[in-house]
Amino acid sequence: AFIAAPPVDIDGIREPVAGSLLYGNNIISGAVIPSSNAIGIHFYPIWEAASVEEWLYNGGPYQLIVFHFLLGVASYMGREWELSYRLGMRPWIFVAFSAPVAAAAAVFLVYPIGQGSFSDGMPLGISGTFNF
């Protein structure tokens, strides 16, 4: 998605935003652009699209990356709790890591659901934020 994905129609108005390296961005300005506003808050896996091109155009990789990130971070927190439990420690590391996890969940999941579209989620890079 970061190297060769086509521009994504982030606002749902057929004005795509390019975030990949092959579409004119460099390593600093590249981004994974959030899902299209036309998708809303619906889960958009690759098998729901008519083609891979449609999935890329509507910003499917954003949901894939964000959901896997949140699952991975939650699993890491569970592992921290398990490790502290097995070593007979108190679970303060788990508690300490819960604040950044709550912040990430707020930015990537709670705020977009509140706004009604994953297009309002935090873009993963500069070109998604500034749309140049």
Image: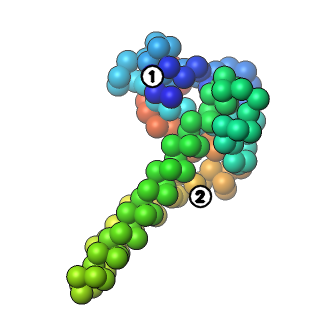
What type is the residue that disc 1 sits on?
Ile
What residue does disc 2 label?
110
Residue 100 shows up from this direction: yes
At 40% across and 24% down in the image, what residue appears?
Answer: 29
At 27% across and 79% down in the image, what residue appears?
Answer: 84
Query: At which x and y percent is residue 113?
Result: 66, 54
> In which quadrant of the rendered view does residue 61 lie?
top right
Q: Is residue 77 left or right of residue 42?
A: left
Front-most of residues 51 and 34: 51
At 54% across and 23% down in the image, what residue appears?
Answer: 5
Query: At which x and y percent is residue 101?
Result: 42, 62
What residue does disc 1 label?
3
What type is the residue that disc 2 sits on?
Val
Front-most of residues 72 and 99: 72
Front-most of residues 110 and 73: 73
User: How many tags in the picture?
Assistant: 2
**Among the two numbered marks 1 and 2 on one chain, the one whose residue lies closer to the N terminus:** 1
